[in-house]
Image (cartoon, helix red, strand yellow):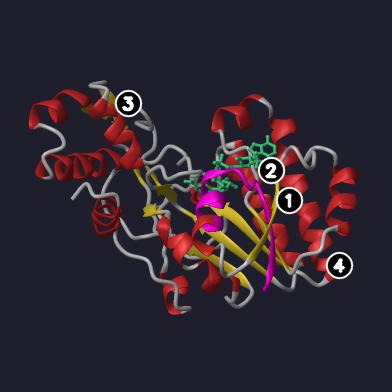
């Protein structure tokens, strides 16, 4: 069985991938408690000694505020550690799968969707850190897969705790009766994370390169939130009154510059990866969890 070393093993996407691929791969779980990503020498010793076929590097501090408040510390974890892991894989002739992000395009003035060949331009430390790794891998490595993920969503499962996503944010607003703002001046892709878990085996076999991993979307984030809320109303889970009260437009955020950092998924689809549209993904997520 192929041995996959998986960093950030307790994280959302890593847990989901392990849950649905446990019988297909031998996962070697690596967590912060095993290795300090800020100690590059320790990191090297640990991974040089580890027996694996593919490294799936998901560990990162993805909290944007942390990356702004601690640029040096988060750069070490999100960027320098990832590049060191790339070096080790390159030296040992191992494939590395790295999770990059749509946020590498959040500084663009022209509208998306962006294909993989478009140069990164980010205005946040998180986006810049991911873009630096992404560019280093493309320039240096011979066997790698970079997955540029959109904003992912899903619901909780045993041992799988989702990061904040559009469906979870809408459900939380309605369930707790909390007026919640959703950004109007932003378009991004939003993807059901199950696609990643379902297609992990195919991802491991992709030709070396960078791939956008995103279902397509034409809506701003506020309109997308209203679509999710509308489906919950149709399913009898929420009332129209609650939607009016809780799902609110934020017109001030990014009023200075509309942010469209959507990803063009045609390269991944042409390589056999199945992705959908935002609405299809929401329907599937709600159906999977018995909400529709
Ligand atoms: N979720 C999304 O929408 C999305 C979109 C684009 C890209 N991504 C990328 O996908 C990857 C996984 O995201 P996720 O949503 O699954 O996030 P997550 O649940 O926060 O998982 C990330 C994991 O990384 C490890 N980690 C976190 N902070 C760390 C730190 N300071 N030092 C070392 N390790 C740390 C932790 O795992 P351990 O405790 O096991 O070490 C954590 O559970 C990340 O690289 C993220 O940047 C996510």
Q: Quadrant of ligand 1?
A: top right
Residue 191 location (% of width, % of height): 38, 54
- SS for tag 2? helix
Residue at coordinates 32% horizontally, 64% vertically from top-left?
276
Crowding at dot 3, Cα within 10 Å, few <14 / some 14-19 / many 20+, comes out as few
**Residue 108 or residue 290, whichever sits in front:** 290
Residue 137: quadrant of the picture: bottom right
The residue where tag 4 is placed is 91
Is 152 rendered above or below residue 248?
below
Crowding at dot 1, Cα within 10 Å, few <14 / some 14-19 / many 20+, comes out as many
Q: Which residues are magenta?
A: 1-18
Residue at coordinates 77% horizontally, 46% vertically from top-left?
80
The residue where tag 3 is placed is 252
Mark 1 vs 2: CB contact within 8 A: yes
Crowding at dot 4, Cα within 10 Å, few <14 / some 14-19 / many 20+, comes out as few
Residue at coordinates 74% horizontally, 73% vertically from top-left?
142
**Residue 65 or residue 11, whichever sits in front:** 11
Instruction: Choose the circle earlier in sequence order: 3 or 4.
Output: 4
Instruction: Choose the circle earlier in sequence order: 3 or 2.
Output: 2
Look at the image and say whether residue 11 sits in the magenta stretch.
Answer: yes
Instruction: Choose the circle earlier in sequence order: 4 or 1.
Output: 1
The residue where tag 1 is placed is 82
Residue at coordinates 42% horizontally, 74% vertically from top-left?
269
Q: Is mark 2 within 8 Å of ligand 1?
A: yes
Instruction: Choose the circle earlier in sequence order: 2 or 4.
Output: 2
In-image side of 227 versus 13 (left or right): left
In the picture, the disc for residue 78 is: 2
Q: Is residue 108 visible?
A: yes
Residue 173 location (% of width, % of height): 27, 27
- SS for tag 3? loop
Question: What is the C-alpha distance between the residues marked 1 and 3?
Answer: 35 Å
């Amino acid at each position: 069985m192929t041995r996959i070393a998986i960093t950030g093993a307790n994280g959302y996407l890593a847990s989901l991938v392990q849950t649905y691929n446990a019988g297909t791969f031998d996962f070697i779980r690596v967590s912060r408690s095993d290795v300090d990503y800020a100690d590059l020498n320790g990191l090297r010793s640990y991974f040089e000694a580890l027996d694996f076929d593919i490294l799936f590097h998901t560990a990162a501090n993805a909290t944007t505020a942390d990356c702004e408040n601690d640029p040096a510390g988060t750069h070490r974890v999100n960027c320098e550690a990832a590049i060191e892991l790339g070096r080790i894989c390159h030296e040992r002739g191992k494939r590395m799968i790295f999770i990059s992000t749509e946020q590498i395009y959040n500084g663009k003035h022209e509208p998306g969707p962006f294909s993989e060949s478009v140069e990164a331009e980010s205005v946040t430390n998180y986006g810049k850190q991911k873009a630096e790794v992404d560019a280093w891998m493309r320039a240096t490595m011979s066997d790698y897969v970079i997955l540029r993920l959109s904003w992912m969503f899903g619901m909780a499962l045993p041992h799988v705790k989702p990061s904040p996503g559009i469906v979870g944010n809408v459900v939380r607003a309605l369930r707790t009766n909390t007026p919640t703002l959703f950004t109007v001046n932003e378009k991004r892709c939003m993807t059901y994370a199950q696609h990643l878990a379902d297609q992990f085996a195919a991802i491991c076999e992709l030709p070396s390169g960078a791939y956008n991993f995103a279902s397509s979307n034409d809506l701003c984030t506020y309109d997308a939130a209203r679509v999710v809320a509308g489906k919950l109303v149709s399913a009898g889970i929420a009332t129209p009154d609650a939607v009016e009260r809780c799902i609110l437009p934020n017109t001030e955020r990014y009023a200075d510059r509309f942010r469209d950092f959507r990803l063009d998924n045609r390269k991944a689809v042409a390589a056999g990866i199945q992705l959908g549209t935002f609405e299809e993904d929401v329907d599937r997520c709600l159906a999977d969890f018995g909400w529709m």
